[in-house]
Image (tube, grey):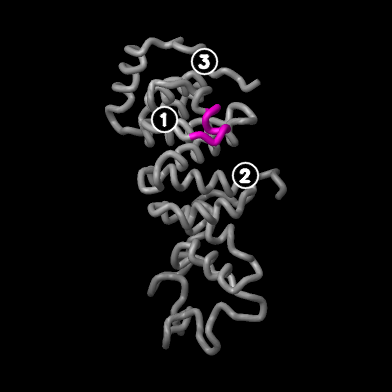
Amino acid sequence: MRRQHTTPNAYPAHLLDELLAVLRRESPAGPGAAALRTRSADARAMLAYAAGDTTVDGLLAAAHRGDTVPGIDPYALGELARVIALQDLWPADRPDGLALFELLLRTYPPSRIAPAHQGLHAQLAFAAGNRARAAELVRLYPELPTPIAESLAVDLADPAGPSWLAAFNRLLPAPGLSLAVPGQSLAEPGRSLAEPGRSLAEPGRSLAEPGQSLTEPGRSLAEPGQSLTEPGLWL
């Protein structure tokens, strides 16, 4: 038997409406952000209510049965899935979050799903070991955030294949470092690391400024009147 998140109707509707109104003042993601910040399991009841006046356990049961939930709010359901997966309070949370994302995608076309939810759905599928589903979601979602799409392209590519190294190097910001295949130099033959016609050290130039010595004449490394060793103290 699956756990029960909250007693049904434990929170009156007017209280949940007031909480949602306050938390949404800054952003639609406010309720989900508050749930993640506080790690409150009870906040999940508020998110399920926002999705369509339903319960967390009711939505989870529909998700694991393979049902759809017509009329549910797609953004609120995505936020509930995100919170359950990222709170990770119980061992079943990650699978439950993934199941809720699958429920969302069965109910609505990909274009109705928020980009942040698209990205997390694909990441959760990959983390669960379902590489085929992760690759399918990368192709399916039209607004997958670029950093997630690029990272999953590396994760899903064959490390021995010709495209993996180029995909990996694209993750490194310029100027950055680049990996090369064994036996291949990162620098082109005959090319110096310095700019053309310029040496890394200019001839006749010291590290000191012109006319200035690294130590001033007549000045010791010790302060005036002070020895480098105190009397009676051996180094």
The type of residue carrying mark 3 is: Thr
Give the residue number, with chain letter if any, for mark 2. 128
Q: Nearer the viewer, residue 51 or 206?
A: 51
CA gap, disc 2 and disc 3 = 27 Å
Tell me, for residue 98, which label it has, or none.
Answer: none
Point out residue 110 in the picture as x, y percentages from the top left corner. 40, 47
- Of callouts 2 and 1, which one flags the residue occurring earlier in the amino acid sequence? 1
- Can you tell which quarter of the image residue 13 is in? top left
Reply above or below: 195 against 21: below
Point out residue 20 in the picture as x, y percentages from the top left corner. 33, 22
Residue 217 visible in the shown view: no
Please rate how many residues cluster around mark 2, counting C-alpha atoms within 10 Å: few if below 14, some from 14 to 19, many from 20: some
In terms of secondary structure, where does tag 1 sit?
helix
- The quadrant of the rendering that contains the N terminus is top right
Q: Which residues are magenta?
A: 60-67
Rendered residue at 51%/83% (across/down): 192
Closer to us: mark 1 or mark 3? 3
Point out residue 131 in the picture as x, y percentages from the top left corner. 61, 53
Reply above or below: 137 against 191: above
Rendered residue at 54%/39% (across/down): 98
The type of residue carrying mark 2 is: Ala
- Of callouts 2 and 3, which one flags the residue occurring earlier in the amino acid sequence? 3
Give the residue number, with chain letter if any, for mark 1. 32
In terms of secondary structure, where does tag 2 sit?
loop
Tell me, for residue 6, which label it has, or none.
Answer: 3
CA gap, disc 1 and disc 3 = 17 Å
Rendered residue at 39%/46% (across/down): 109
For residue 40, side relative to residue 233 (left or right): left
Q: Nearer the viewer, residue 170 or 85?
A: 85
